[in-house]
Image: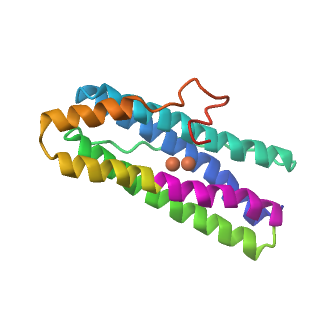
């Protein structure tokens, strides 16, 4: 593995951990907004991101390199509406998709086919991640400030499987 590919994947381990942290913060915000279902959803999402980090962590070690963990930067999530929290989550996923695309490009340029194959999983995962955030946003936009509709969405979000259901925090769609 070239040092360029290695550095980029190591960065992504840190990026996924920071995404995990930021989803945990969003879960806390949902708790404060009294949406326990959404809080659960983000907690599962946080575990899923940790699963992504561990996947790359294992990949690096399998290729005989070491991982350097860095300090995690946490963005403050404004506590206003559920819709805003989900918009922040979509923005985060769109940013991660860019990181993954850049990583895929580096792996291609360096002709690191093992890394290309590994990144393929992440490219597909990002399509899913963006879609699930957009789906929730669409529902929340329809619900507007209708309390009954919001509570119904929260109930649906609370039904998301994943937490404690897998190993290593792979999450529902792992
Ligand atoms: Fe991720
Ligand atoms: Fe994600």
Q: Quadrant of the C terminus?
A: top right
Q: Residue at x 74, y 73 (%)?
A: 108
Residue nearest the observer in this picture, 75 or 27? 27
Residue at point 75%, 64% (across, down) = 116
Q: Is residue 161 above or below residue 70?
A: above
Q: Is residue 35 magenta?
A: no
Which residue corresponds to the image point at 31% horizontal and 25% vertical from the top-left? 36
The quarter holding residue 70 reads top right
Q: Is residue 99 visible?
A: yes
Q: Is residue 167 left or right of residue 29?
A: right
The quarter of the picture where the N terminus appears is bottom right
Left or right of 46, for residue 112: right
**Front position in the image: 73 or 147:** 147
Q: Quadrant of residue 9?
A: bottom right
The residue closer to the viewer here, 114 or 68, is 114
Q: How is the image coloured?
A: rainbow
Q: Position of residue 94 (x, y in %)?
A: 44, 60
- Residue 136, image x, y percentages: 33, 47
User: Which stretch did the figure color magenta?
Assistant: 113-129
Can residue 38 be seen in this snapshot? no
As displayed, is residue 31 above or below residue 174?
above
Q: Quadrant of residue 7?
A: bottom right
Find residue 42 and report its horizontal and vertical position in percent.
42, 36
| Residue 158 in the figure: left or right of residue 109 | left
Q: Would you say 26 lies left or right of 13 here? A: left
Q: Residue furthest bottom?
A: 109
Does the stretch in magenta take in 121? yes
Q: Nearer the viewer, residue 31 or 15?
A: 31
State the image coordinates of residue 105 (x, y, percent, origin top left).
66, 72
Which residue lies at the image location 41% right of the left edge and 29% below the top edge? 159
Q: Main secondary structure of the magenta part?
A: helix
């Amino acid at each position: 593995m070239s040092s360029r590919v290695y550095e980029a994947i190591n960065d992504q381990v840190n990026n996924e951990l920071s995404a995990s942290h930021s989803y945990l913060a969003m879960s806390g915000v949902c708790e404060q907004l009294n949406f326990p279902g959404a809080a659960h959803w983000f907690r599962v999402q946080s575990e899923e991101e940790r699963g992504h980090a561990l996947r790359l962590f294992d990949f690096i070690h399998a290729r005989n390199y070491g991982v350097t963990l860095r300090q995690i930067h946490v963005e403050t999530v404004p506590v206003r509406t559920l819709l805003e929290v989900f918009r922040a989550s979509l923005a985060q996923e769109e940013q991660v998709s860019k990181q993954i695309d850049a990583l895929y490009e580096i792996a291609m340029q360096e002709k690191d086919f093992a890394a290309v194959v590994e990144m393929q999983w992440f490219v597909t995962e990002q399509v899913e991640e963006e879609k699930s955030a957009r789906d929730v946003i669409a529902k929340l936009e329809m619900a507007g400030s209708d309390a009954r509709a919001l509570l119904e969405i929260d109930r649906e979000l609370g039904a998301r499987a994943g937490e404690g259901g897998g190993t290593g925090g792979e999450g529902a769609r792992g």
